[in-house]
């Protein structure tokens, strides 16, 4: 079904100071730190009490003539974010903010912004900026090579040779002499770590790895963006850093532009300690191509001045239960899960990129630090943070938390499977925008697909496919849903969606819903300030008879079609069955099509070291790129297989949307009227009777991954009954018919 909900009659939670002049006065223009794919901007304003000012954005590659439209900047300001228990109370300052999305790395762009207001604009109404997206960090071409070997290495060594990182990095000695650093590595140096086990004998005073007692590598040297200090696997075998139970393995909070590449890290509480709030934090930290397992925390910095992290192409494996999805809140007779692993990544600051990682068995997977009231200094705010193309499985709380983010937090194209409490969290976001788009969420038994709590503001929720409900009731402000597909799981007594709006300018448009058959009330309109008995409900998936007191009817758009149960058997898995180990989603990302097919679709093949990534080409209005792919959800209808296929389309607010249809046994297509548009983009998830299919085969091929329910069990088996060695994804073939 496709609905549009007018929100004009809802309560407005806004600071009184906003009510003044209707004309807008343009103030300071801010260019945020660029990332690989995205550029963020802020424009301070005064006035515009009636909130009818707009800022149009466009861009072009430097040296070209054709301009492309981007999403307009989001008007923010006056929204109150508060949580009494922690004495948090913050009012969003008046400004516009937003991003130009999915650009090319290491490319200069000309960006133009035009402010308009029917009531008049004072000050400079047009701003232009030339900004270059960043490139991935690389070692200096002329960097000095230092060879690192494990203790007891008996093979032939290349010179200069060192035992352990500390000797190569600092020239450190044994025992008390491990803090004597007279021969430090220089910017541009490359430490090649040769194969072997680097496990500290930390209770030995003369530990040969120079980390007595605590087993921690204290690394604080400073490279530069062009000449980073690189600690990299040499490529002659696995270089394993075993923490031997140490609390922290790598303390890098004083470092700048250090790269860790291709290492295996295990058996420690914190793999990389990169910053502490109001103390110190790293800059330019890169962790890539690493396997980080049996740890409590992967990477953490809660220092507001941390910036420009790249956390990419890693595998993070925590210590939580591989067989059951219990969680910590209301766990029933089994008790909450022990906090053996907290989160894979938690960061604060600006300019961070967290992408192409596989994460499993942590309380939370990837987080922005909740932090609290944003710092007043621009360089200390949590802005321009990208979290995209990650695979996340079996968390104990939430998949991704944008909590604590301020402006231009981008959560894009992540695939998330099995979370007991929340899907994607904004608890809170301090004004936004937080872009939450093109994510796939599967099996969130709590029904809280989007945990929008602590009164967040400025959330743009676009093009997500969700096999769960959205039932959070804590009010949120300035929130805009577009082109999302929410498929209910037939949870007894639970409706499909709750609209907990705190502002009259929140909007919902072109979203599709598969209501729960076992719930009488499908849609809840929770208005700020209303008592529990005064909320409005729609019965049995029908919105025709729901009216706001004194307001308009909430109806389907004319001509829309309803889903009448094509996925009625989609349900939460049962606990019965033999105990099987969970297979996490291994490395190896979406496979690109063959060269000729790829070229015909307007995409490009990735370079060999990036084949696991899904590259997208061809910018379009709204700057959400599209490559070839689709999300498909398998179900059983009358004992015969049918496929609900969703092709996501180019995004532009109020234009362009989602295209969906159902194919039955006769390959006959039935439109869902989710507004067709152009240029497809990508994610793949198949389900059949509660199972997740990964691959192009559906019920007749590919690999099946059974989700975990409360105290349930999981298994990974191919359709032939054999356990797959890996679970791979691929771009599916064209739909039948």
Image: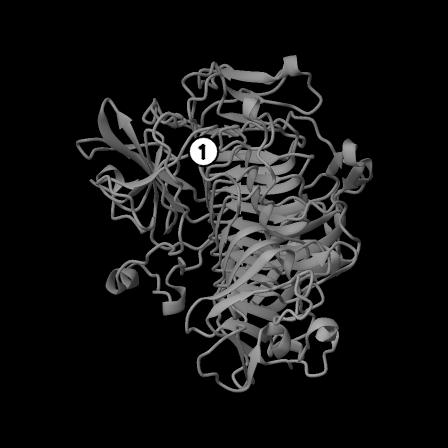
- Kindly tell me whether residue 585 is visible in this rendering: yes
Q: In the image shown, does 184 or 73 lie closer to the viewer?
A: 184
Q: Quadrant of residue 648?
A: top left
Left or right: 206 as drawn, with respect to 676: right
Q: Residue at x 53, y 70 (%)?
A: 135
Q: Residue furthest left?
A: 666
Determine the image quadrant of residue 582.
top left
Q: Nearer the viewer, residue 665 or 357?
A: 357
Q: Report the quarter where the N terminus lies.
A: top left
| Residue 22 pos. (x, y %) | 75, 42
Q: Where 32 sits versus 23, above or below?
A: below
Q: Residue 276 versus residue 608: which sits nearer the camera?
A: 276
Q: Position of residue 76 (x, y in %)?
A: 69, 44
Local secondary structure at mark 1: loop
User: Can residue 72 be spotted in the picture?
Assistant: no
Residue toward you, 603 or 3: 603
Question: In this picture, is 443 found above or below 381?
Answer: above
Q: Residue at x 75, y 72 (%)?
A: 176
Residue at 57%, 28% in the rendered image: 6
Q: Write down the residue under mark 1.
A: 443
On screen, 690 above or below 57? above
């Amino acid at each position: 079904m496709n609905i549009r909900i007018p929100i004009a009659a809802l309560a407005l939670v806004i600071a009184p100071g906003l009510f003044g002049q209707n004309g807008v006065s343009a103030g300071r223009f801010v260019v945020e730190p660029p990332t690989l794919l995205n550029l963020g901007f802020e424009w301070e304003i005064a006035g515009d009490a009636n909130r009818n000012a707009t800022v149009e954005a466009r861009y072009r590659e430097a040296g070209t003539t054709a301009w492309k439209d981007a999403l307009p900047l989001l008007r923010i300001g006056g929204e109150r974010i508060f949580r009494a228990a922690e004495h948090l109370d913050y009012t969003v300052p008046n400004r516009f903010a937003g991003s130009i999305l999915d650009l090319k790395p290491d490319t200069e762009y000309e960006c133009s912004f035009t402010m308009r207001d029917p009531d008049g604009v004072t000050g400079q109404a047009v701003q232009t900026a030339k900004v270059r997206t960043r490139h991935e960090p690389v070692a200096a071409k002329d960097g000095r090579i230092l060879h690192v070997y494990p203790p007891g290495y008996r093979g032939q060594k290349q010179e200069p040779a060192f035992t352990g990182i500390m000797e190569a990095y600092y020239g450190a000695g044994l025992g008390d002499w491990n803090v004597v650093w007279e021969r430090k590595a220089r910017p541009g140096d490359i430490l090649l770590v040769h194969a072997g086990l680097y496990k500290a004998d930390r209770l030995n005073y003369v530990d040969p790895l120079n980390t007595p007692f605590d087993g921690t590598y204290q690394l604080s040297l400073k490279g530069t963006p062009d000449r980073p200090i690189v600690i990299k696997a040499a490529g002659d075998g696995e270089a394993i850093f075993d923490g031997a139970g140490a609390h922290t393995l790598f303390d890098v909070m004083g470092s700048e532009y250090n790269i860790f590449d291709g290492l295996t890290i295990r058996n420690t509480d914190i793999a990389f300690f990169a910053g502490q709030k109001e103390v110190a934090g790293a800059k330019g930290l890169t962790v890539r191509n690493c396997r980080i397992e049996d740890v409590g925390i992967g990477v953490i910095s809660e220092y507001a001045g941390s910036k420009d992290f790249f956390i990419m192409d890693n595998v993070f494996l925590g210590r939580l239960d591989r067989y059951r999805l219990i969680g910590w809140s209301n766990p029933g007779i089994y008790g909450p899960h022990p906090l053996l692993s907290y989160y894979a990544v938690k960061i604060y600051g600006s300019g961070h990129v967290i992408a192409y990682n596989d994460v499993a068995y942590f309380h939370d997977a990837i987080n922005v630090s909740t932090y609290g009231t944003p710092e007043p200094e621009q360089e200390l705010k949590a802005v321009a943070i990208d979290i995209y193309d990650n695979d996340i499985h079996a968390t104990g709380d939430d998949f991704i938390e944008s909590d604590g983010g301020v402006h231009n937090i981008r959560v894009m194209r992540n695939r998330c499977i099995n979370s007991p409490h929340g899907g994607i969290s904004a608890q809170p976001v301090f004004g936004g925008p937080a872009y939450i788009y093109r994510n796939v969420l599967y099996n969130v038994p709590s029904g809280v697909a989007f945990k929008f709590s602590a009164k967040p503001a400025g959330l743009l929720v676009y093009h997500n496919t969700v096999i769960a409900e959205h039932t959070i009731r804590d009010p949120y402000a300035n929130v805009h849903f577009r082109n999302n597909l929410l498929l209910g799981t037939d949870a007894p007594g639970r409706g499909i969606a709750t609209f907990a709006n705190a502002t009259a300018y929140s909007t919902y448009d072109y979203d599709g819903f598969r209501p729960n058959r076992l719930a009488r009330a499908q849609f809840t309109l929770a208005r700020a300030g209303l008592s529990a008995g005064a909320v409005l409900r729609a019965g049995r998936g029908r919105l025709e008879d729901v009216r706001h007191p004194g307001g308009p009817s909430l109806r389907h758009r004319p001509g829309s079609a309803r889903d009448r149960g094509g996925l009625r058997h989609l349900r939460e898995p049962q606990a019965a069955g033999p105990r099987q180990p969970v297979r996490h989603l291994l490395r190896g990302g979406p496979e690109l099509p063959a060269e000729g097919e790829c070229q015909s679709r307007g995409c490009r093949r990735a370079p060999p070291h990036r084949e696991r990534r899904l590259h997208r080409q061809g910018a379009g209005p709204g700057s959400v790129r599209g490559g070839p792919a689709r999300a498909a959800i398998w179900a059983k209808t009358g004992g015969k297989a049918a496929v609900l296929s969703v092709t996501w389309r180019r995004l532009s607010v109020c234009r362009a949307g989602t295209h969906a249809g159902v194919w039955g046994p006769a390959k006959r297509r039935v439109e869902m009227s989710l507004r067709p548009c152009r240029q497809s983009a990508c994610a793949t998830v198949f389900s059949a009777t509660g199972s997740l299919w990964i691959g192009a085969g559906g019920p007749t091929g590919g690999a099946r991954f059974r989700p975990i329910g409360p105290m349930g069990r999981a298994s990974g088996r191919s359709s032939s009954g054999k356990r797959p060695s890996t679970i791979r994804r691929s771009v599916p073939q064209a739909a039948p018919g």
